[in-house]
Image (cartoon, rainbow, N blue to C red):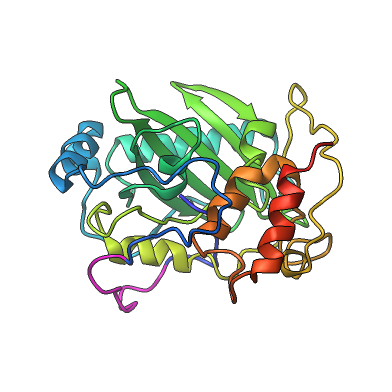
Amino acid sequence: MALALLAGAGPLPADEPKAPAGWKPVASTQSGLLLEPPLDLSWFTTGEFERVSATVGPEKIRKAWTTAVTALPPHSRPEVKGLTEPEVEDYMRQVRRLFDEGAANPVSDVGLISTQEDVIRKPMYNHIAAFSNAVAHVYLLVQKTSGNGGWGYFSIVQDRTTDPPTDYYAEIKGTEIKFEGTSCYKCHSSGPLAIHPVRADLVSDAALAAALNRHIADQPVSRMHFPQDDPPPDYGKPLALEACTECHDRGGDRAPLFKVHAHPIRVLVDYGYMPVKHRLTPEELAELKAWLEAKP
């Protein structure tokens, strides 16, 4: 998955126009920002993608759908203003159960950032599903790397009753919820991430992926929840490059960026996803590269 935010006002109508089949292939702009060359997946077949993806349970994926976002029951507390951690945990268990019962609408893909990691140099399989009610937007990522045995479950709960909304990140291990802070903040400075399959034939449903990405548009500025055992450290001074601070600034459309975010900055700028409306000039790229590589 790559940097753009999954959130919105609710399920898409059944007559929502479908995206065309296929997906625009991703390609490096040769910016010089990447620490490692792009992972070569020319050998990777669609059949292998489908085979491994189906090991999560073929009845759970590749289903007909009319809405991209699965509706959740109303929250039990009327006029709630701030979810408790046990309530957040309940939402995470609920969406895992819905997925395991085949009641979710997941899109399956082999994602961009996971396959471009300078550490994880293997294809990363994903199943991504979105859920919501008036109180919370909830996301589930079921993920594994090629060659590894089991599927891992990860969830984001965005508490929409706080101002700004609060994003909780956690790994789900059975019924146990492990909240995460810094490790997730490295890529999720501004919230849940959108879907950028690495190749057009490595996404199960281009229309569903596009619908989930359209669930991005009204994402408000949100804040990261750091659990007590994983508080935020001092990240130093934020990135001050004007082309980035147009959005990524205190009080801006998205949260400030720090050197802890170096990996997604390198990948998303190199692949042309950021900035959204234009490409950085050679001078701006040189300034960004110097900032990323400067010693504290």
The relative height of residue 271 versus residue 89 in the rendered view (above or below) is below
The relative height of residue 182 versus residue 128 in the rendered view (above or below) is above
Residue 163, percent from left and from top: 78, 57
Residue at 13 percent of width and 43 percent of height:
47
- Residues 239 and 168: in front is 239
Image-quadrant location for residue 140: top left
Q: How many marks?
A: 0
Q: In the figure, is residue 233 to the left or right of 282?
A: right
Q: Residue furthest left?
A: 47
Residue 157, percent from left and from top: 58, 44
Residue at 38 percent of width and 60 percent of height:
26
Mostly what secondary structure, the magenta segment? loop
- Looking at the image, can residue 140 be seen? yes
Residue 17, percent from left and from top: 32, 79
The relative height of residue 207 versus residue 234 in the rendered view (above or below) is below
Residue 76, percent from left and from top: 59, 45
In the rendered structure, which segment of residues is drawn in magenta?
12-23
